[in-house]
Structures are given as C-alpha cells and as structure tokens.
Image: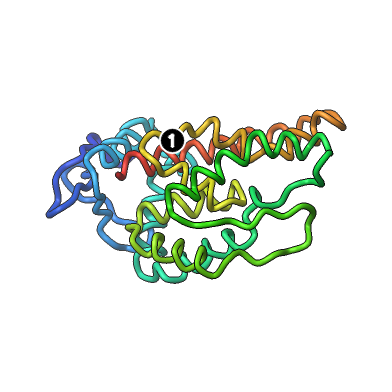
Amino acid sequence: MKRFYKEALALAEGSGWQVKLDGRGVKTVGGRPQVLPSRALAEALAAEWAAQEETIVPASFVLRDMADYALDVVAPDPVATVAGLIRYAETDTLCYRADPGEALHARQLERWEPLLQAAEARYGVRFERVSGIIHRPQPGETLAHLRDLLNGLDPFALAALNTLTSLAASLVIGLAALEPDADAGALWIAAELEEEWQAELWGRDAEAEDRRTRRAAAFATAARFAALAR
C-alpha cells in the first residue's frame, strides 16, 4: 500500500488520545475508533505512521497491532482473556524445577525463587513449588486472588500481559513486567533460563537463536506498550 497521508499527529479525543492522519482519526482493524489511554502511547503510534516511507510496511506497526488487539479482542470480552491468563498461573514455569541437587535446579533457585517470593509478598499469595514435571495444583486462594487482580486491569494492560505471559509461560513474570520499575531485559533472561541451559549443554544453532531474538524483541515491545499505556 502506498502512503496516503502527509502528517500523523497524536491529538486529544474525548477522554483519551487518537492518532490523526491528515486530521482523520485512525480506526482499529475491527473498525472501532482507536482511542488510546495515554498521550505517550498515542505519540508512539503516531511515530510508527510517521516513519513510513513511500510504501507502508504493515509489519512495522507493532504497537498499533497491540492497541488493536486491546480494543477489538480484549475490551469486548475481558473475562476470556483473564481465563486464559489464569491457566498460566496454574502451571507457571517458575514453579516447576529440576530435582534438588541438579545444577539446573541451583540456577532455577537463584533466578526464579526471588521472582516468586516477590510476587508472593506483592500480592499476598502462596505458590506451590514442584520438582519435576508432574502437575501439582496451585492453592485455590492464590488463583482466586490473581483472578481478582487481573479483573481490575484495563484492556491495554491485559493485552500487554497476554503477550508477556505467553512468551514467558509465566504469569508471575508477566505481572512483574507490568510494574513501573520493571527490568524487562532481566525478566526475559529469567523466562528463557531453560532454553539458555539447553544451548549451553548442546550448542547453539542459527535458527534457534533467531527465534530467541524475535521472542525477546516481542517481550520488550509488550513491556514498552504497557509502560506507554499506563
């Protein structure tokens, strides 16, 4: 598609903000007005439009795609998104460790245990730790408390959290990435601990490394989206 506008600006729209292309408000893929919760996010989306050259590159609209997902998918049915996220809490990667005494267990304890303990202190819950891959249910009170927490998030935070959690296979890491002082890079290192362990043991190949790079970039983008929308 050829670029069809000259100017992309972030302008106030009702109680939110919207990108205007030559004065016309951008809509979502689903046809909804793309009204955003913060000026910072609107300016970031306007920058995506402004960066387009003669030919528009759809793949470069990573923040716009997340905003569309928040408005078109999450906002109409947040309960479904919350239900999907709670499933990650039931089998959170950080809770499943190698057997005690193994070198991998020691690294998991070092990198994962502080994150779990911080989540327990922050949310007033308790997580069940498991050695091995046999599923053990998390306490019902923990899941109920986390569900209440998620139900209090807006569609933009939930959209970001959905991406963060699915990439990390951990709701604990996803929620940590939403915190104002989050270190997304350090959280991603924790999320890919087991992949890094396997790479150290068996070597690296270009295809796997490319996949890891793309996933790390997606995680960083989702964390940035959450910060901009906050």
The image quadrant that residue 210 belongs to is top right
Q: What residue lies at 49% left-to-right and 55% top-to-bottom?
A: 162
Q: Nearer the viewer, residue 45 or 86?
A: 86
Q: What residue lies at 59% left-to-right and 47% top-to-bottom?
A: 167
Question: In which quadrant of the rendered image does the C terminus lie?
Answer: top left
Q: Nearer the viewer, residue 52 or 230?
A: 230
The amino acid on which the numbered mark 1 sits, given as a three-letter code, is Ala
Image colouring: rainbow
Q: Nearer the viewer, residue 146 or 35?
A: 146
Q: Label 1: few (<14), some or many (≥20) within 10 Å?
A: some
The image quadrant that residue 41 belongs to is top left
Assign a secondary structure to mark 1: loop
Q: What residue lies at 73% left-to-right and 40% top-to-bottom?
A: 194
Question: In which quadrant of the rendered image does the N terminus lie?
Answer: top left
Q: How many numbered dots are placed on residues in this image?
A: 1
The image quadrant that residue 29 belongs to is bottom left
Q: Is residue 91 left or right of residue 66?
A: right
Q: Is residue 116 left or right of residue 101?
A: left
Q: Is residue 124 left or right of residue 5?
A: right
Q: What residue lies at 39% left-to-right and 60% top-to-bottom?
A: 149
* 176 vs 131: above or below: above
Q: Position of residue 163 (x, y in %)?
A: 51, 50
Q: Position of residue 207 (x, y in %)?
A: 76, 35
Q: Position of residue 35 (x, y in %)?
A: 24, 53
* 49 vs 134: above or below: above
Q: Position of residue 146 (x, y in %)?
A: 46, 61
The residue tagged 1 is 182
Q: Nearer the viewer, residue 135 or 188?
A: 135
Q: Residue furthest right?
A: 202
